[in-house]
Amino acid sequence: MGLSWFSIVRLGLVQMALGAIIVLITSTLNRLMVVELALPAVLPGLLVALHYGIQITRPNWGFLSDKGGNRTRWILRGMAILAAGGVLAALGVVEMATSYAIGLIMSIAAYALIGLGAGAAGTSVLALLATATAPHRRAAAATITWLMMIFGIAMTAGVVGQLLDPYSPAVLIEVVSCVVLTALAITVLATWHIERGVEVASEPDPIPFREGLAEIWAEPKARMFTIFVFLSMTAYFMQELILEPYAGLVFGFTPGESTTLSGIQNGGVFLGMLTVGIAATALRFGCLRNWVIGGCLGSAASLCVIAILGGYALPQTLLPAVFALGFFNGTFAVAAIGSMMALAGEGREKREGTRMGLWGAAQAIAAGFGGLTGAAAADIMRTVTTDAPAFGAVFVFEAGLFLCAAFMALRIMESRPAQAELIAGE
């Protein structure tokens, strides 16, 4: 037996809880450090990069869940570590106001815990989805779990923003503690006996982690897909830190208008994910390979349009282009996750968690690398030319990465025609 639709939604609740804690460190605590404490913006940037870097441990977590045959245990352990890191991060920000050195040490430890917890819980959730979801449900499963995570992020950001006013350290600790405890409670309830009735087999002859990872890296498909994930996710995140400054510097957007622009982009991401979930599962229209390639090509085209529009600087033209970028980003992302689930079961048996961990590590490293690279490239280009062509050059380079990713996806999946049918549920 595999996961029912209800069980897939329950795992989506886990993703929602995970996103609720993560948004506290990437949004709320980030703002508090920069605005209320008047610290350099690079500090929270480096701390967030640390949490991404720590997620290089994802293959270890996936390997451990493969060996034990019980992924729920690692989901719960990961969420507990993540929750502890979230509370410690809030305490670290409060401590910085009185003792910067002690607060910084607490924050470094907290963000390391957050990276470990997110890696353990997130990898185990994806591994369980990959091993126990019927092939024809994978696109919808990816859509459901990621949309629920986005919902958790958006809902938590909105609610926490309201509860923190007027701000005080005591209010911050209280609000963060409530979010963390709620997320833990949701995770425990959502995973209760979720693996009952699901075929779970542990590794009959456990081997050392390095040997297990080497076996996976020796598989051509797994190795190529790891490179594809890193390349495509680097392209996906390169515009994250420069799109709003581009809108302000080139198109004259106010801070409020830039925030609205970000909302329009996320709306496009949501619609793109929803489109793939409905089309690939309910309507059986297209295989995930084609949705991945289409999303990459559409993202590349949208980035080129955004770059070209900088030469005209007409604000009303930027909105539809950014919405299109979000739509194709969402299309690519959810199709890539569905493809990841399908490929996780290919090759040596009982290694689904290790493969998902390897690809999750590539994604996390690409997220940090892509954002920093995009910002650094824009700064360098602005020293040699004006704002519009400087940002435009970065967007065009990003488009080129998406084209390379599309070509890789075509190569990886083209030699497996049966896979497309399997994923489409035909």
Image: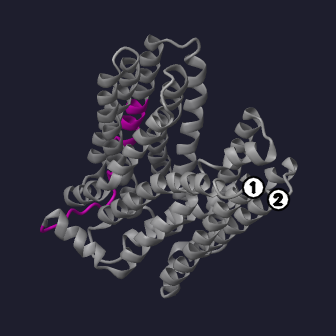
Figure check: 246 above or below 424: above
Q: Quadrant of the N terminus?
A: bottom left
Q: Is residue 352 above or below residue 380?
A: below
Amino acid type shown at disc 1: Ala
Residue 195 part of the magenta-drawn span: yes
Seen at 57% across and 31% down, the residue is 157
Which residue is rendered at x = 80% and y = 46% of the image? 251
The disc at residue 388 is 1
Q: Are marks 1 and 2 in contact (CB under 8 Å)?
A: yes
Give the number of marks.
2
> Residue 244's spot in the image, x, y percent?
68, 44
Residue at mark 2: 311
In which quadrant of the rendered view does residue 67 lie?
bottom left
Task: Give the camera-side residue of 169 and 311.
Answer: 311
The numbered disc on residue 371 is: none
Position of the C terminus, as image quadrant, is: bottom right
Q: Amino acid at mark 2?
A: Gly
The span picked out in magenta is: 183-205
| Residue 366 in view of the camera | yes
Q: Secondary structure at mark 2?
A: loop
Q: Main secondary structure of the magenta part?
A: loop
Where is residue 422? Give x, y as percent.
50, 77
How far across and down, in percent of the image, does residue 48 sit?
43, 41
Q: Is residue 409 left or right of residue 256?
A: left
In-front residue for pair 216/108? 108
